[in-house]
Every structure is written in C-alpha cells, then in structure tokens.
Amino acid sequence: MEKYSQRLAYGEALVALGAENPDVVVLEADLGKSTMSSMFQAAYPDRYFEMGIAEANMISTAAGLAASGKIAFCSSFAVFASGRAYDQIRQTVAIGKLNVKICGSSSGLSDFGDGSTHQSIEDIAIMSAIPNMTVFTPADADEVKKAVRAAAAINGPVYIRVTRADVPAYTKGEFLPGKLSVLKKNDNAVCAIIAHGLMIEAAMNASDILEKKDIQTEVINTGTMKPFDAEGVLALSKRVKAIVTAEDHSYIGGLASLTALALRKSSVPMDYVAIEDKFGQSAHSLKDLLEHYGLTAGAIAEKAIALLK
C-alpha cells in the first residue's frame, strides 16, 4: 500500500487550522524541519515561536500564551516533549488545565538511527499518568489531521503522538476522541487485534496471516489512549475468544496495561506485542528494530494462535 507521512500531515493540519483561527500559535524546539511545524512558520511567521533547544522554556511560554487566550501547539521529538519538559507540563499546563497541545514527533522506535536517547518507548505512560491530559495516538496521516482539529477543540492539554515513519492509510470516517474504531470488521471474528499508530500496519498484516489459517479476526484502532475506551474493550471481549494488543511502546503503562485493566472483569484471555522493559538502540532501519524487539505481524499472529489453543 502507498504510505504517507504523519509529520507532513501534522504541518498541513497546523497551516489549515491557522487559516481558520487567528488564536492558533505554534512553538518549536529547534526541530521544525523534522516535526514539520516549519510549514506554519512559512505561512504565519508572526504566530510562530522558535524556542531553540529549550523544551521547558517552550512549554512555559506556551502556558503563558494559553493563559492569554491562545491555542498553543508545541512540537519536539516525543522523548524530549514528554521527558525534558515534564515538570512544566505537570506543574503549569496540566494543573492549570491550560490550552496547550503537545506534539511528540518521531515517537517510539521510529527514529531508528539515533538510538535509545531519541526513542520514546515510555511517552504514552508518562503523559497518560498526568491528570487533565488527553492522549491521541493516530493511526495514519489522515487521523493525525483529525486529531489536531480535535485537540484544538478540547479546552485543555492534549498530547499527540506522531511517528517518523511513513504509514499506510487505513482510517475512514469521523475521529471520535475516547472511542475505539474498527479498521477491519468481521462478525465471525474469534480474535481481536487492538493496536495504534505505527503498529496498525502490522496488525492488519497479522489479520491476513490468521485468516489464511481460517482464524477470523477484527482489527481495532485506539486513536485515543486517554481517556481509554475501557467499556469498548469489555464489549469487544464479549464477541471474541482472544485479544492481542500491539504497540511500539513499553508494555508498562501502554496499550497492553490499559487493555488488561479493562479486561479485569472478563474471562477472555489476552496477550501483547510490545517493547519489554528495555531501551531502544541504533539500527540501520526501522524494520531491523521492529524485528529485533518482536514487533511484527508474525509475532502478533503467533500470540493469537497460542491464546486460541
């Protein structure tokens, strides 16, 4: 399938939003050409603030702009957006319920060449643990655009997780914050694969593998990790015999943990494909990393087969 850039979609969404709303401002931490927020700079230079390599200052400045009535979008690599600026996000933005939107770009293992220091395998856990924070994990470029619009409409802090890798287009229809969306419907499904972001492609490919073995599956997208649709997962468990989650994030505090919590009153077995309690590392390609950490369609299919046995 043809693949599209989530980062480019983010930049395009900011420009479109800026044309409609003069209160939209964008802040960047010296990575605008990578996060693609530079597209907003080109269109609206008077509403773009380059803060340099100073994420904490960027968030504090965004908080001031938000307190003045602006809708402030901040961009940086996910590992820096969630880590270096954590104190400012928690103490000022989240406690104050300020209208600051944070784009964590190049998330997960997608920045394969820069190694563990640049690979955010814990950003969802960090941001989801902060009260008043909404967390979006869009599946493809189109959903990134919808997530940006949804974030702007929310009165409060939002974190949007964007991958560096180009991904196929799978989503259709409306983006509903806080709700699961079905990417592959199957009324005869015995197994459900729940995934988000970069791992949607692997989930769809795993479904194809399983169906060649006469195992009917559904594929579910969690475009919102917080608030998590626990009721949707529980309802899903009443229709299938097994659930497998897939994410390019630590299983601790990620989709696997939230799904297990949602299923605490269910007898349906689940398993996960995720990063164990380890850091990332440098590689020649993202494919190499995904295979090394077991984040593949084959691994998802194997987990499903084992559960069903």
Image: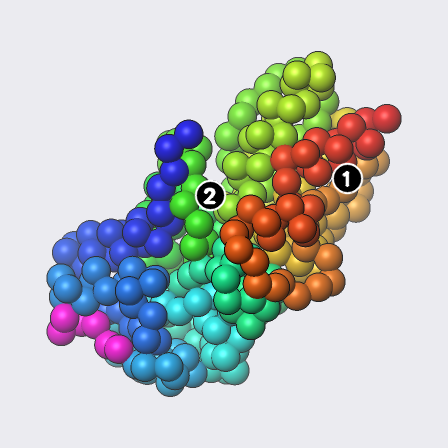
Residue extending furthest toward the right: 309
Point out residue 163 in the picture as x, y percentages from the top left corner. 45, 53
Count how many numbered circles sit on residues in the image. Answer: 2
Residue at image mark 1:
270
Q: Nearer the viewer, residue 148 or 132?
A: 148
Examine the rendering and report whether any part of residue 134 can be seen: no
Q: Is residue 161 above or below residue 70?
A: above
Examine the rendering and report whether any part of residue 250 can be seen: yes
> Which of the two discs, 2 and 1, labels the residue nearer the N terminus?
2
Q: Residue at x 42, y 36 (%)?
A: 168
- Snapshot quadrant of residue 295: top right
Q: How crowded is the residue under tag 2: few (<14 C-alpha within 10 Å), some, or many (20+)?
A: many
Q: Amino acid at mark 1?
A: Met
Q: Is residue 291 above or below residue 61?
A: above
Residue at image mark 2:
139
Q: Residue at x 44, y 76 (%)?
A: 93
Describe the element under mark 2 as helix, strand or loop. loop
**In the image: residue 70, left or right of residue 229:** left
Gap between marks 2 and 1 measured at Cα: 22 Å
- Snapshot quadrant of residue 251: bottom right
Point out residue 180 in the picture as x, y percentages from the top left corner. 54, 39
**In the image: residue 286, left or right of residue 193:** left
Q: Amino acid at mark 2?
A: Ala
Point out residue 109 in the picture as x, y percentages from the top left corner. 55, 57
- Snapshot quadrant of residue 270: top right
Q: How crowded is the residue under tag 1: few (<14 C-alpha within 10 Å), some, or many (20+)?
A: many
Residue numbers of the magenta segment: 45-50
